[in-house]
Image (cartoon, rainbow, N blue to C red):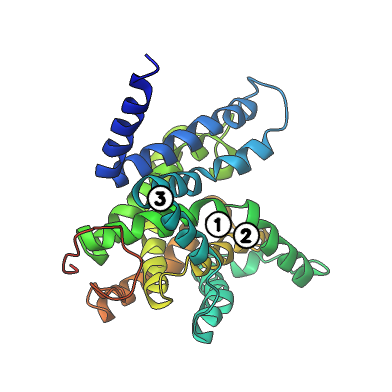
Amino acid sequence: MSGQTPSHSRNLRQVMAQHPLFFFFLIAYAFSWIMSIPYILGQWNVWQGNFMIIFAIKSFGPCLAGFIMFGVTEGKAGVLALRKRCVQVRAGWQWYLFILVGIPALSLLGILILPGALASFQGFPPHFPFVYLVSFVLIFFAGGPLGEEPGWRGFALPRMQPRYGALRGTLLLGILWTCWHLPDFLTDAQRGGPGTDLTRLLTVNFPIFLVMVVAMAVIFTWVFNHTGGSVFMAMLLHTSINTFGIVQPLFTAPSVVNTDLFMCISFVVPAVLVIVFTRGQLGYKPGADQPQAAGAEVLPAA
């Protein structure tokens, strides 16, 4: 039996290396969904306790899957390359401006378009800029970006673009990214929990969320391709989007607080414009100096 164990390990590694995307998503989903169970049960009063730490840990499923699959497919060199791209801060100033100023501006515009939103504004609380800055830092490390982007943009996207083309690969990633959030709809993270209308969540909130996240995925790919495959810039973009969540409660209009419609509006129009003006390439150049899977076949972009 001891003689068979190394052989089985090698066989599993070979299978995982042959199907890197399948096993990446399998690990990301399995880890995050399993880790979501205590938080869901706590929300539904099945278990007693504060499971916020576990909820934060569950967001690291894609990151864990990305590093595992880099180790399987490319070994230590691949892991080190991913770590390097996670601290790749060098990018044009216009991308920092777009992420740090443009994203909140787009999100705010999405709110102001909704009926009754402006009239429901409660005003900024004292020291709001300081609160926003602290929230930005906390969200970067524990609010999703650090746990997700090394997987979504660090591992999956560089393999999906050569295989499916920039646009099709991005749309597919956006759908899978959306579905990864499904357990959240059973909690207050996505306006779920005891007493909520699950039918409305799945027939209204989830479709809006799906369109929103797919549109965001287009923006992420566009930024990623123009910043040399920087995972850090993807994390910064993710943080900017999530941090705007502390502005949303300042507007009490039902059209703002009950769904993600304002965020959907904020990103669908820019995403469509990016697709049109880049002719679906999203800044992707096959064969350019971008992170690719080892030995991956480079196909023309769709």
Q: Nearer the viewer, residue 37 or 292?
A: 292
User: Label 3 belongs to which residue?
Assistant: 75
Residue at (21% x, 64% y) in the render: 165
**Which comes sooner in the sequence, label 3 or label 2?**
3
Residue 264 occupies quadrant = bottom left
In front of the other: label 3 or label 1? Answer: 3
Q: Could you tell me if the residues under marks 2 and 1 are in contact, i.e. CB atoms within 8 Å?
A: yes
Residue at far front of view = 3
In primary-sequence order, the first of circles 3 and 1 is 3
Residue 145 circle label: 1
The quadrant the C terminus occupies is bottom left
Give the CA distance from mark 2 to mark 1: 6 Å
Residue at x 51% of width, y 65% of height: 84
Is label 3 or label 2 in front?
3
Picture residue at 58% right of the left edge, 53% below the top = 257
Look at the image and tell me whether residue 103 can be seen.
Answer: yes
- Which type of secondary structure does the marked residue at label 1 adopt? helix
